[in-house]
Image (cartoon, rainbow, N blue to C red):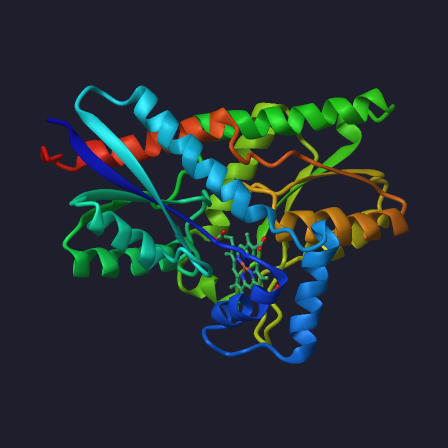
Amino acid sequence: MSAKIGVLVMSYGTPESLEGVEAYYTHIRRGNPPSAEQLKELKDRYEAIVGGVFPLRENTDRQVEALQAALNRDSGEGIEYVCYQGLKHAHPFIEDGVEAMAKDGITQAVGVVLAPHYSVMSVGGYIKRAQQKAEESGIEMAFVESYHLHPELIDVLCRRVSAKLDQFEETGAARGEVRVLFSAHSLPERILAMGDPYRDQLLETSEAVAAKAGVTSWQFTWQSAGRTAEPWLGPDILDTLRELSETQVKYVLSAPVGFVSDHLEVLYDLDIEAQALASELDLRLLRIESLNSDPAYMSVLSDVVRTKADQMKVSQQ
Ligand code: FEC
């Protein structure tokens, strides 16, 4: 008999179509519908990236499929991992994923989020919802909280940074002339007063990648801050680019280490919005490739999931 372990793979979620953007946005805003102007602005951003197609859905599907294959390829005899998707703001929701596990008779599961850094306002929110549903469904669940310094994650990010520095070199810019801008989704400033580890974890990832890639000219900046009245963590990448343009810096490499997929915050906020500002400011801006379902990222995820599963006393089913 083999033991079956459920793996709840959690991700942000994206609308299924332009018609679905309003419901999605309302969910992000905890049930408060956006104004007509806010809705139009968001739809315009989605249309600008790929004309109404939502790349995050397909990327998440591929990541979940690849993770299940990686887990079972390397798993010890007698354990079968079954992956379920649970999205924060779209179908199948986190609760749907847990329910699907329960329907399949899963009694033990590991939860992991497709975001390496922990904040009580990001990963903490995913875990809370999954934990509550798991308790109601009689599933024992353990959670991976963060993996921001996993050696294979640092390695693959270092390779991504080096590849783009090579590209700069091929076009005449010395590696040392390129300022590397590590970035992640901003959060409200109040997380700092709560002692949240998010900012420190992001700085640790950035430092580790820079050290491994031999990068000395780098800084951390935020991006994609929400449109709410309270202060968000800064500086924002657009302000950072403006500041850099007033110095000797001419070449900038964007490394959004807080994200693992191509989606709106990368394809619009960086590739369209930041890129347009960079050309206006006469800065040459490149961006590292997203991890998506790179086997090295799948290996990071399968390692952290397996480590959690090993800590649970697996019962034979
Ligand atoms: O491609 C896509 O369809 C989805 C792209 C997407 C990702 C993403 C990741 C994170 N968010 C985080 C925090 C917040 C907070 C608010 C907020 C608002 C939005 C809006 C859109 C959106 N987020 Fe997001 N986020 C993505 C998309 N996010 C669209 C609404 C319009 C806007 O503000 O731009 C503010 C909520 C509020 O109004 O109170 C907070 C964090 C992450 C990274 C970790 C993770 O993936 O969970 C943190 C991808």
The reply to whether residue 122 is visible in this rendering is: yes
Image quarter of the C terminus:
top left
Where is residue 263 drawn, in percent x and y? 61, 48
60 vs 233, left or right, is left
Q: Is residue 296 left or right of residue 132?
A: right
Q: Picture coordinates of residue 96 (x, y %)? A: 33, 57
Which residue appears at 14% of the width and 54% of the height? 138
Quarter of the image for residue 148 reads top left
Residue 28 x/y as whole percent? 50, 67
**Residue 221 at least partly seen:** no
214 lies above or below 117:
above
| Residue 219, placed above or below residue 212 | below
Name the residue: 39% across, 43% down: 146
Q: Nearer the viewer, residue 115 or 192?
A: 115
| Quadrant location, the N terminus | top left
Q: Nearer the viewer, residue 50 or 284?
A: 50
Residue for point 51% across, 32% down? 293
Write down which quadrant ligand 1 falls in. bottom right
Q: Is residue 182 left or right of residue 204?
A: right
The answer to which of 95 and 242 lies nearer the viewer is: 95
Image point (84%, 26%), residue name = 173
User: What count of labels does the image hold?
Assistant: 0
Q: x, y percentage for residue 168?
A: 79, 27
Q: Which residue is at the front of the view, 130 or 2?
A: 2
